[in-house]
Image (cartoon, grey):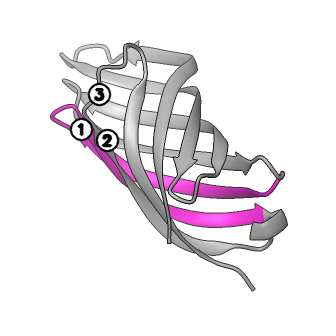
Amino acid sequence: MLEFKLVTRPVDVKVTEVANVEGQTVMSGKMFGVAVFKDGRIAVKDFVNSSDLLKGSGPMFGYSTYTFDDGSSITARYAGAIKDGKAKGEYTILSGTGTYANATGTGGFESVQSGFKGAFLYDGRFIVKTP
């Protein structure tokens, strides 16, 4: 299992308020993050995220690519929810390159309280299978 800490921030995000539904927003956009793995490796995370939130809670999904310093990568789809200001989701690994060529597997993440302004902290994990 690959365990990591992840810090993310929005890069180009659009939030649209839904007409005639108080507190309903739809958000979509590009995000960026840095993951520090338990084994000491670091990966950058480029991803797109979409959410459908009523007063800050609701479903979200997206697609992430984690790229390691050696050029290897893991691409995964995630789906989850935001509730009471906390995010939690599950990964499905779609593909990989280099060390993770033809990877499959699963994983997950959950948000962690932090003092970061404009950025978010998560605990994450991947269970990677390679041929």
Please give left or right for residue 54 compared with residue 126 in the image: left
Total labels: the figure holds 3
Q: Is residue 19 above or below residue 51?
A: above
> Distance between the Cα atoms at labels 3 and 2?
9 Å
Residue 45 belongs to magenta span: no
Percent x, y for residue 37? Answer: 54, 53
Picture coordinates of residue 5, whole percent (x, y): 45, 45
Q: Secondary structure under badge 2?
A: strand
Q: Nearer the viewer, residue 68 or 89?
A: 68
- Residue occupying the point 46% across, 61% down: 125
Under circle 3, the secondary element is loop
Looking at the rendered image, the disc whose residue lies closer to the viewer, 3 or 2, is 3
Placement of 75 over or under 59, stated as above or below: below
Q: Earlier in the sequence, mark 1 or mark 3?
A: 1
State the residue position of label 2: 111
Residue type highlighted by circle 3: Ser
